[in-house]
Amino acid sequence: MTAERTLDVRVVPADAELWRRRTITIEGATPDAVVTVKATTVRNGVDWTSRVSFLADAAGRVDLDADAPISGRYRVADAMGLLWSQTAVDGRPGGLDPESVETPLVTTIEAWSEAGTGSGTSGAGEEHGSAQLIQRFVGDGIRRVEVREEGLVGTLFVPEGEGPFPTIIVMNGSGGGLNEVRAAQYASRGIQALALGYFRVPGRSRYISRTPLEYFETAIDYVTRELAPLGGKPLVSGQSRGGELTLLLAARFPERIAGIVAFVPAAYVFGAQGAADPEEGWDGPTWTWQGEPLEHLWHDNSGVTWQPWDGVAHEDPDRDVYIDGLHDRELVAASRIPIERFRGPVACVSGLDDRAWPSSMASRLVMRTLERSGHEAERLHLDFESAGHITPLPFMPTTNIDVLHPVSGARYSNGGTVLGNARAAERSFEEVCAFIHRATREPQRS
């Protein structure tokens, strides 16, 4: 009977922040054996798993950053593929936001040699090993503070050490809620971050319809007055509808904002779409100012004869409501966000394969408008070729491509590939963190 041998599975660092890349190696296998690796993470009570196989080298070693899998979920040399390629075991699109950011993610990595494989007369026998990889949402020394002042609903994450810190307001998109995970990651990079909720949070509407811009004006003033942001003003950031909102706030309050980061944004104001109050409908207003709705592209648009937010696709699969909407030139002009009013640093992050809406086009329009207007501050556009409606953070699953909208329940596609979205998530986080630090050092232009 063949004796069981232990594989040495090493994760370095084993316990660190969510965004930190790890190395994963396996030693002690039979030379040339096929070594299978399975990663399991429990997220909100659901197992998320990935499984890949490698060919051990002549020394019985596998380095997941140097060796590409020969079988399984992904086929590139990337240790973190064990995480970004995971899917929920029940096969359904699942939520990745944790119930509490104070509870870390624990991934169990199991490795075994496939019986009979490898060099030698009998091949591999019983060879097993395991290790844990821990991803912390809230790093050491970071303070989490709930903000419930002046009608605001948010959570503040304060970095370790003495301020003042670069400070950013972080907003979600049409799913609503609080983006505590992203805010916490910024804090671990020396950036003070307020995750601000504006709907689908306690005390606020269940829908995005008729959200008053005065609420965000209050938030900007609160952060400026109470949180002592480096440079005297906060940055503002949001994703998807929050990206649209970010551009809108920069255009409306240009003197109060230090810089902006718009993830997969829109260049126009749109109606409430899939996050609408059912009584208002998809073509009702999203934003108001002084009680009056802001003009938007779906308001009696003469070029739009259908809408996708009920989950029913157009009979022509190539039809795009966002292109149809541009045919109404008068409404296009009225709903365009006048980003040229903002003179501070601007960053846009988009995916060329965004299937939710054309964020790449919108970001390019923003950059071209700023250039034509003589904008002198930094302009950064990260446009990823194989990415879609990208909003994840590094080393989280990017397999949720076809999903159900959290408000309407309609099915839609985010676009992109699993690998493309993962690469975009990692690179964009690093570049955005650097941009935020640069923006607070750059002299402010009026």
Image: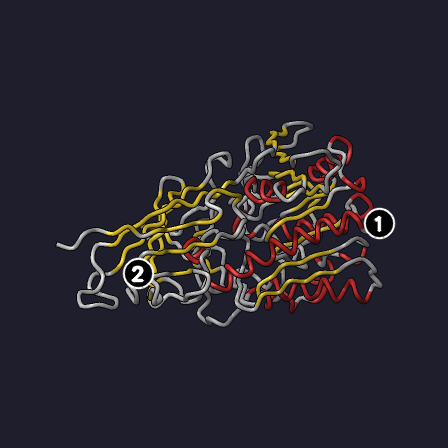
> Looking at the image, which residue is at 25% across and 52% down?
5
Counting from the top left corner in percent of width and height, residue 369 is at 76, 64
Of discs 1 and 2, which sits in the foreground? 2
Q: Disc 2 residue type?
A: Val
Counting from the top left corner in percent of width and height, residue 315 is at 44, 69
Q: Quadrant of residue 384?
A: bottom right
Mark number displayed over residue 189: none
Counting from the top left corner in percent of width and height, residue 351 is at 57, 63
Q: Quadrant of residue 371?
A: bottom right
Q: Is residue 80 above or below residue 106?
A: below
Q: Is residue 203 above or below residue 242?
A: above
Residue 175 placement, left or right of 237: left
Residue 240 placement, left or right of 406: right
> Looking at the image, which residue is at 75% across and 50% down?
259
The colour style of the image is secondary structure
Of 397 and 336, which appears nearest the observer?
397
Q: Disc 1 residue type?
A: Gln
Q: Earlier in the sequence, mark 1 or mark 2?
A: 2
Residue reaching furthest to the top: 149
Packing grade of label 2 (10 A; few <14, some 14-19, many >=20) is many
Q: Which residue is mark 2?
A: 35
Of 131 and 334, which appears nearest the observer?
131
Q: Quadrant of the N terminus?
A: bottom left
Packing grade of label 1 (10 A; few <14, some 14-19, many >=20) is some
Q: Which residue is mark 1?
A: 444
| Tally of numbered discs | 2
Marks 1/2: CA–CA distance = 55 Å
Secondary structure of residue under mark 1: loop
Counting from the top left corner in percent of width and height, residue 121 is at 18, 68
Of 254 and 391, which appears nearest the observer?
391
Answer yes or no: is residue 52 visible: yes
> Looking at the image, which residue is at 40% across and 64% down?
74
